[in-house]
């Protein structure tokens, strides 16, 4: 059973940066896709970035494009989200997620968006608070 654990959340002032990490275990092969989502109370979970482990192709929501960067370490067992130019609108609980799917999922995401229903495994979340 794959397991995910986020870390790196915290409080930062507007314009600042944070880097979130997600440690992954229980993945037996390399054809899977990882994603970052965020959620505020009373709202649906918003997909903001994905990356396909097999070739590193990534996709971003318009709300974070140019400010956030998704990446993996060399072992492909730790996922990162570098968040720059943060604003109070970025305040949310951030989750990493994964699913056993590859390039076809990335193509689907590009057509339909980063949807939570595409992902099977989830971490517990880490809170990010951006003050003005």
Image: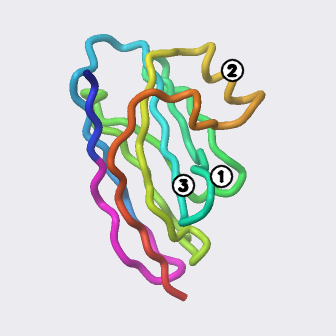
Image coords of residue 66 (percent x, y): 64, 55
Region in magenta: 6-17
Query: How many dots with numbers?
Result: 3
In the foreground, 80 or 101: 101
Q: Quadrant of residue 100?
A: top left
Q: Residue at x 48, y 44 (%)?
A: 36
Label pair 3/2, CB-CB below 8 angstroms: no
Sequence-wise first label, 3 or 2 = 3
Q: Are dots 3 and 1 in contact, CB under 8 Å?
A: yes
Are there few (<14), some (14-19), or many (20+) residues within 10 Å of tag 2?
few
The numbered mark at residue 65 is 1
Residue 88 location (% of width, % of height): 57, 78
Residue name at image x 53 percent, y 57 percent: 39
Q: Earlier in the sequence, mark 1 or mark 2?
A: 1
Q: Which residue is mark 2?
A: 107
Local crowd at mark 1 within 10 Å, few (<14), some, or many (≥20)? Answer: few
Mark 3 or 2, which is nearer the eye? Answer: 2
Name the element at disc 1: loop
Report the residue at 30% width, 49% height from top: 6
What's the CA distance linking mark 3 and mark 1?
6 Å
Select label 1 or label 2 by which is in front.
Answer: 2
**Vertical placement of 61 versus 126: above or below?**
above
Residue located beneath label 3 in the image: 68
Q: Residue furthest bottom?
A: 132
Magenta region includes residue 10: yes
On screen, residue 47 versus residue 9, left or right, reads: right
């Amino acid at each position: 059973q794959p397991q995910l654990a986020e870390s790196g959340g915290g409080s930062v002032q507007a314009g600042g940066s944070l880097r979130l990490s997600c440690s992954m275990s229980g993945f037996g092969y390399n054809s899977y896709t990882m994603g970052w989502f965020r959620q505020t109370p009373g709202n649906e979970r918003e997909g903001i970035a994905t990356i396909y482990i097999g070739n590193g192709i990534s996709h971003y929501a318009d709300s974070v494009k140019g400010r956030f960067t998704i990446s993996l370490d060399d072992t492909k067992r730790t996922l990162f989200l570098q968040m720059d130019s943060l604003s109070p609108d970025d305040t949310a609980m951030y989750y990493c997620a994964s699913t056993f799917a590859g390039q076809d999922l990335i193509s689907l995401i590009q057509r339909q968006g980063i949807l939570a229903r595409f992902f099977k495994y989830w971490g517990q979340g880490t809170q990010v608070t951006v003050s003005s």
